[in-house]
Amino acid sequence: MKILFFKIKRFITSFPYHFKKMRIKAVYDADLKNLVKSLGLDMGIENGEYKCKYCGTIISFENLQAILKENSEIKFICSNFECLSKIS
Ligand SMILES: [Zn+2]
């Protein structure tokens, strides 16, 4: 099962249909950083260790849009519109 964390305001306005269709566990923008910290991923992001699952852009707190859990692996999605539209 996938678990997704989004900067929710932007996602709802961009993809209202997805939002109805998917089961999303959402956090507000301000909470995303805390969530990342609680997962122990904040240092990796600050050091530029993670890349967007789709386009390979280095993930930062500025462009981080979603966190996706696939099996036990954490993946990051950047705020690129094309990458967001690939989430299904
Ligand atoms: Zn991307």
Image (spheres, helix red, strand yellow):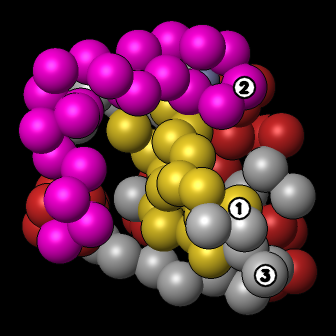
Tag 3–tag 2 contact (CB < 8 Å): no
Q: If the image is split into quadrants, where does the C terminus sit?
A: bottom right
Q: Is mark 2 within 8 Å of ligand 1?
A: yes
* Mark 1 vs mark 2: in front: 1
Q: Position of residue 62 (x, y in %)?
A: 24, 30
* Mark 3 vs mark 2: in front: 3
Type of amino acid under label 1: Glu
Q: Residue at x 41, y 15 (%)?
A: 58
Give the residues in magenta.
38-59
The answer to whether residue 17 is left or right of residue 2 is right
The answer to whether residue 42 is left or right of residue 70 is left
Type of amino acid under label 3: Met
> Residue 35 — which label?
none
Q: Position of residue 12 (x, y in %)?
A: 59, 65
Tag 1–tag 2 contact (CB < 8 Å): no
Label 1, on which residue? 70
Label 1 environment density (alpha carbons within 10 Å; few <14, some 14–19, many ≥20): few
What element does badge 1 sit on? Answer: strand
- As measured in the structure, the alpha-carbon distance from the residue carrying label 3 to the one carrying label 1 is 7 Å
Q: Position of residue 67 (x, y in %)?
A: 50, 56
Type of amino acid under label 2: Tyr
Label 3, on which residue? 1
Residue 39 forms part of the magenta stretch: yes
Q: Residue at x 60, y 56 (%)?
A: 73
Q: Quadrant of residue 46?
A: top left
Label 2, on which residue? 54
Q: Quadrant of residue 72?
A: bottom right
Q: Earlier in the sequence, mark 3 or mark 1?
A: 3
Q: Earlier in the sequence, mark 1 or mark 2?
A: 2
- As measured in the structure, the alpha-carbon distance from the residue carrying label 3 to the one carrying label 2 is 19 Å
Q: Is residue 22 above or below residue 38?
A: below
Label 2 environment density (alpha carbons within 10 Å; few <14, some 14–19, many ≥20): some
